[in-house]
Each structure stands twice: as structure tokens, then as C-alpha cells.
Amino acid sequence: MCVEVGVTHIAFDDDLMLFSRGDISLLGILMDCLSHLERCSGPAVSPAKPDEGGLGLKDIPTWNSALLACALWSLHSDAEFLWVRWVHGHYLNGVSIWDYVKRRRDFLLMRSLCDLRDTLVVAYGGRDEAIAGLEGCCVGEN
């Protein structure tokens, strides 16, 4: 697939995300692990990042829905991302994400995108309204 879409190099960013329950004892263990990682390999927790979000605790279901909505918009708008090209070539095959019929064998992200799509169509009262609602959230600086 990489050759087909012209990818010659893949690089990974240096962000690290850790997930756990919000127990104080577990947060202490996570901080100990991060300190050990820093001593062994060099990457350190950025002081600016904890300041942006306290301890970086987020409402995961809300963030998940927001990120899925942006991914849905990327598929709708045929954004120039490798994963969008892959989904269009492997799953959609010329069919709009709005017309795609979810299958049990689809990978989890695809099933989740279809579930969100269906939820948005009902919540907004129709397909065109859902698209307009997504555009308002996912385009520009919003």
C-alpha cells in the first residue's frame, strides 16, 4: 500500500500517552515510571504540557467522540492522509462514508466511525445536516 500512495519514509513523533485509573497511588507509580524512563533514555515530561491540562486528565469519552468526528470529516472530505487513502481504497471503494454499510469484520475504527456517523445523522436530523454540523466543528480553527 505504501508504494501505491507514494510513501517512501515513515517517522514517528515523540509523544507518549499513558492511560490509567485516576487513583493517586497509580498516578504516583506512573510518575515513578516516567522518572525511570527519563533516567534511562532521556525523554522527560514537558513542564508546559502538565500546565496546559493540570495532570493531563481528560474526559476520554468526549475526546474520543471529538477525534472520531474529525476522522469522519477527513474521510468525508477525502483529506490527503495515508490512512484516509487506505480506507478509501480498502473499504469505501468509491462509496461515500455516508453510504457505506458497516460490516462485522470491519476493523474497530471503521465500525466506530460508522456508529458515530449514524448517531450524528439522527442527532442532526439528516445526512446533510450532520455534514454541515461536522464542517462547523472540523474546518478552520474550530
Image: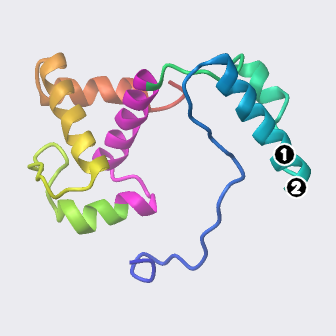
Highlighted range, magenta: 61-84
Classify 10 Å Cα crowding around label 1: few (below 14), some (14-19), many (20 and above).
some
* Side of 103 relative to 57 (left or right): left
**Residue at mark 1:** 36
For the residues bearing labels 2 and 1, Cβ distance under 8 angstroms: yes
Image location (x, y in percent) of residue 68: 36, 36
**Residue 79 percent across, percent down from the top left:** 40, 52
For residue 141: magenta?
Answer: no
Q: How far, Cα to Cα, is label 2 from label 1? A: 6 Å
On the image, the x and y values in percent for residue 98 come to 15, 42
Residue 111 can be seen in this image: yes
Q: Tag 1's secondary structure?
A: helix
**In the rendered image, the vertical position of residue 81 relative to residue 135, given as above or below:** below
SS majority, magenta? helix
Query: Residue at left 15%, top 26%?
Result: 121
- Name, please, the residue furthest toward the bottom: 3
**Residue at mark 2:** 40
